[in-house]
Image: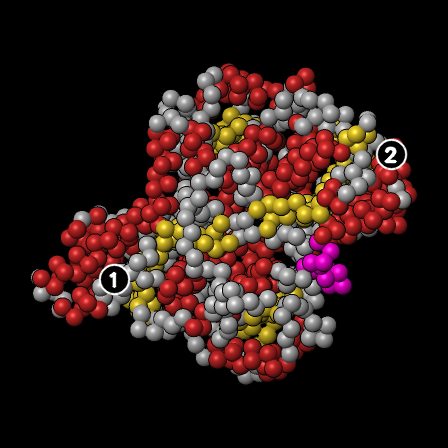
Amino acid sequence: SGSAMDHQPKFFENLSGAGKAIAVLTSGGDAQGMNAAVRAVVRMGIYVNAKVYFIYEGYQGMVDGGDNIVEVSWESVSSILQVGGTVIGSARCKPFRTREGRLQAALNLVQRGITNLCVIGGDGSLTGANLFREEWSGLLEELAQKGKIDAEAVKKYAYLNIVGMVGSIDNDFCGTDMTIGTDSALHRIIEVVDAIMTTAQSHQRTFVLEVMGRHCGYLALVSALACGADWVFIPEYPPEEGWEDTMCVKLSENRARKKRLNIIIVAEGAIDCHNKPITSEKVKDLVVQRLGFDTRVTILGHVQRGGTPSAFDRILASRMGVEAVLALLEATPDTPACVVSLSGNQAVRLPLMECVQMTQEVQKAMDEGRFLEAVRLRGRSFENNLNTYKLLSHKRPDAELPKTNFNVAVLNVGAPAAGMNAAVRAAVRVGITEGHKIFAVIDGFEGFARGKIKEISWGDVGGWTGQGGSILGTKRTLPAKYLEKIADQMRTNNINALMVIGGFEAYLGLLELSAAREKHDEFCVPMVMVPATVSNNVPGSDFSIGADTALNTITDTCDRIKQSASGTKRRVFIIETMGGYCGYLANMGALAAGADAAYIFEEQFDIRELQANVEHLTEKMKTSIQRGLVLRNENCNENYTTDFIYQLYSEEGKGVFDCRKNVLGHMQQGGAPSPFDRNFGTKISAKAMQWISKKLKETYRKGKVFANTDDSVCLLGMRRRNLVFQPVVELKSETDFVHRIPKEQWWLKLRPLMKILAKYKTSYDVSDSGQLEHVAMLPKEVEAGAI
């Protein structure tokens, strides 16, 4: 496709940091994942031959200078990936707010030739950095006048470049879908809620949970969505007048429906529509006085900031750290200070001040009581969460529900994946709200053929979000050999639409059903598939439900194994992961766990490569980091098995390091779903059910549903920044059916990141990055697919 108009791809090998000095600091409140970002900046900086400095204790260290600003080496950031908080410290700094303080800071940087700053912190820290940059030349002139630096230095260090990364558990920064630390904070909250639910269940209690978020309700909202809370209070969306009555009615209705517990989540900054605070104590007193329920308050507090970063935060921070160094290398005096962030699944650069202004707009809107505006300014992802929560948490009285007389069947197909149950719950509840009857199919297509199908109600799926595995039961069986029987069941139960939640088999199953339409009219109904498999190998979607949970399992296990290896010294672990032929888990697990290598099917390797890896580890054992971690996808190569690689490493490493191997196996399919999988499963499934309703209306003619076009059998996937419905027939050309993987996979682009961070020379195509975008205020009409 090389027309003269095409841009040449841009490779980072051609960007040199020689002669440049980069300093990295963390500022403001700490957040899990900051260390992963620090590690990535240091290693990428050293990789491109720049000098890299730590600034300890945030801006305070920059003002104090001395040994607070230290040049660092590759090994300086070893073993920090799995540590929460920030190892270089963060402090609130009064002096930096004064010009004198900034003058001193400028002197400290110039003396070391540092003109590139990478700031990891919240909006306050980033605003401070921008001011520093604007004052820079004035500060240098003043230093020259005072005789502290010479005229030569003023010329040589004339410009300061700044790149920011947002580290904040509140996710309160506009322009970025997720800030570093948010996902980990959700992990802490969900762990607590899951634990509280079992005790509340035992005693029929009501729990009021207070979560962090002074000005932003993101944590409260998403954790309410992820645990199916009965009620949530957030600053952006205060409850309407008379909420006290509404809430109490809702709680007692739930109890009447045999629900033994209530969970109410309160953001610490929650307010009513008159901007008066709503505290957790106030909520508790209300429930006790009005309903007499046994009620307890739990304030999560700093637990949310602590603990090890989740896999998502490690990958996010590592991607952003590398992107930040690229942005610094490409910065010119004319480019505005930028923040690197993630939009959907895409790393982007945005002007720092645009983001800050927008973030301040939200606060202003809230202060002035323009709450709808505040929600809109928070961005599409926040708005999506709020709408989904409202849809799923409150059942409208039967009398108010529309009656469509359509029957929709929901089934799970393939291997179990954490988050499947959250998806089923959302489908059932949205379907009921839309006026359909929902039928649950037990045990996939096989159960369908045997008539294992029953109507399922709103209450039946209560508490399902947090359950691992598949409650409906799932099978890998394909429908082709049961077509007659399934058609019979569809006819008997008068099924007008199908929703399939599952992995690659679900995709194959829909292809078979759509091919069977010419023989069986029963299959001429709208069908939609929601991807759910730990392998993340379904074409048409960047993510599938369950992959994030599996990734966290792999990462946690690797952390433990690394710890054991550090203790023994000079030991290399070879770890086998699942995924079929898809290397997603091995590759992303390696990135999140800080592995030395990951063997995957998609990138062929030979004996020379294995040899190079052994030599690389031998070199590593001479440094202070005396341990190695190698991940291998289960099907990466039929001859180079896990045993083979283990034996090869053992032989070649004799006298230098010894080896151990570990097959992770089915623990990767189990466990409670991660916040990401609960949330993704809930939102994508709700959207799929809304599509079914739309298609049913479109295809209902003369008293029956008849759909036989390609676009009535779709897969709903996340592609880069959007959720898109794609006809399964059109995805055939994108699929490698022999190996059950998509022909092109986005995450292969991240493969060089892992190699760079493990000190391998590699080529890295960075054509995607580098364009500065603007903070988009989406018009209302745009149906965006933010997760």
Between 366 and 668, the residue placed more toward the observer is 366
**Range of residues picked out in magenta:** 731-742
Instruction: Give the quadrant of residue 106.
Output: bottom left
Q: Secondary structure at mark 2?
A: helix
**Which residue type carries mark 2?**
Arg
Query: Which scheme is used to colour this image of the protein?
Result: secondary structure
Which corner quadrant holds the C terminus?
top right
Between 432 and 566, the residue placed more toward the observer is 432
The x, y position of residue 409, in whole percent, is: 77, 36
Would you say 680 lies left or right of 527 here? left
Q: How many marks?
A: 2
Instruction: Give the quadrant of residue 643.
Output: bottom right
- Residue ID for mark 2: 491
Which corner quadrant holds the N terminus?
bottom right
The x, y position of residue 304, in whole percent, is: 45, 44
The x, y position of residue 604, in whole percent, is: 65, 73
Dot label at residue 226: none
Query: Residue placed at 25% from the left, 62% from the top?
Result: 159
Name the residue furthest front. Answer: 4
- Residue ID for mark 1: 159
Query: Residue placed at 85% from the left, 38% from the top?
Result: 522
Say whether residue 119 is magenta.
Answer: no
Would you say 622 lies left or right of 484 here? left
Query: Residue placed at 65% from the left, 67% from the top?
Result: 602
